[in-house]
Amino acid sequence: MTVYLDNAAATPIDNRVKKEMSRSMDLCGNPSSFNDGGRAARVQTEQARAQIARFINARPEEIVFTSSGSEANNTAIFGVADKFRSGHIISTAIEHPSVLEPIGKLAGEGFKIDLVSVDAEGFVNPRNILNLIKKDTVLISVMYANNEIGTIEPIREIGKLLKEYRSKLPLSARNRGPLFHVDACQATEYLNMNVHELGVDFLTFNGSKIYGPKGIGVLYVKRDLEIKPLILGGNQERGRRAGTENTAAILGLAKAISLINKKENKKLPKLQDYFISNILKKISDVRLNGPKKNRLPNNINISIFGVGNEEILLQLDKHGIHAGSGSACTSHAVEPSHVLKAIGVPKKYLNGAIRFSLGRQTIKKDIDYVLKVLPKVIEKCRSLR
């Protein structure tokens, strides 16, 4: 039996997405070419762009296609930095590495950085962000939903506070910032993505978390905002990202977006509650990381005392259970999770953190199988210590 519970790292590609991508393979032209083949590819690409824009209540020209969520995050952060050249950036201590590492690089180039702390469940206080804003604050970047512990941040409230703050600035200062960037890669399948309701200037998401293709990301850039591209060499994406458009992946992403059904996802909270309550009953000295409420419905992150996550994952693999230990982008890191450190997880639990992330395909039978195997795996791992 195989049970895939690493959907936060990457979801299986939906068969309907595969079919759409296969259809697109007949479009041999380069969307930027001035010939019939290129125009045919361009028509399909722009139809997909418009469909994706509608999903987040944006204009098609506000959509920039990238190779991944990480590239989209980098483009937003370095794009703002290149525009202003200096200034102050605010983020949180639990962001994805594709946000924290670019910000760290900018710190070495003279930008002032403030990382807002979070509480024991991973929530940031919007007022704490507001209180850190300075005259030279150019960017605020906050993740919509945390990839490791599933915490859903109050993005809408932060956006509202920023709008009120900007309204009090002189007209000449309103275009300088602070601009608001949100990494929404984990949120796309489950949460409201309306950019106007959220109050964001930049929004990042990708295909690999929504049963779409890997290797495709989106950066929403609010109208009239100019950012410098990371990749030079062509005028694609209105000059914001050079390179031939990946037509198959773009069409696949649009199809994946069309298949999102938030009503369907209502089954996940019940499976999540069932999974969590039984883990806490069946395994001794285990803790749930992250909140019980305002948490992504597919996320279960637990820490188990007396074992290491690598040995647990290897043993689970032998039983056909595929789970994760945190961010896929740091899966080979030796250091314990920066997210778990930031929420104050006791040291004795840091190395035994496991993330199970449910998906559309997950059923109760899968959970029962894991609940049967996991206690035995933990007992075996503990006995070998």
Image: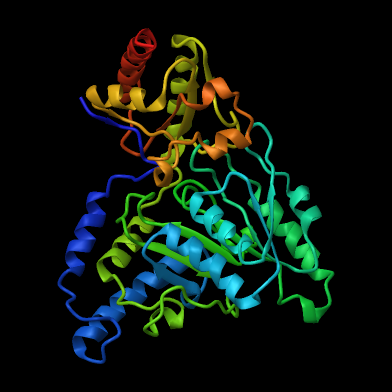
Location of residue 262 with respect to 316 vertically, above or below: below
Location of residue 208 with respect to 368 vertically, above or below: below
Q: Which residue is drawn at the image coordinates 49% and 38% (left, top)?
A: 148
Position of residue 218 in the picture relative to residue 167 (left or right)? left
Position of residue 72 in the picture relative to residue 159 (left or right)? left
Q: Is residue 54 visible?
A: no
Position of residue 159 in the picture relative to residue 185 (left or right)? right
Which image quadrant for residue 130? bottom right
Location of residue 323 with respect to 40 vertically, above or below: above
Q: Is residue 107 visible?
A: yes
Position of residue 305 in the picture relative to residue 8 (left or right)? right
Location of residue 330 with respect to 91 vertically, above or below: above
Which quadrant of the figure contains the N terminus? top left
Task: Give the number of marks.
Answer: 0
Scheme of colours in the image? rainbow
Which quadrant of the figure contains the C terminus? top left
Q: Which residue is drawn at the image coordinates 79% and 63% (left, top)?
A: 134
Q: Which residue is drawn at the image coordinates 83% and 72% (left, top)?
A: 169
Asked whether 287 or 298 is in front, the reply is 287
Residue lying farthest bottom?
34
x and y, in percent, of residue 17 in the image = 26, 56
x and y, in percent, of residue 119 in the image = 69, 35
Q: Which residue is drawn at the image coordinates 21% and 69% (left, top)?
A: 24
Asked whether 192 or 324 is in front, the reply is 324
Which image quadrant for residue 99? bottom right
Residue lying farthest left?
26
x and y, in percent, of residue 306 in the image = 46, 15
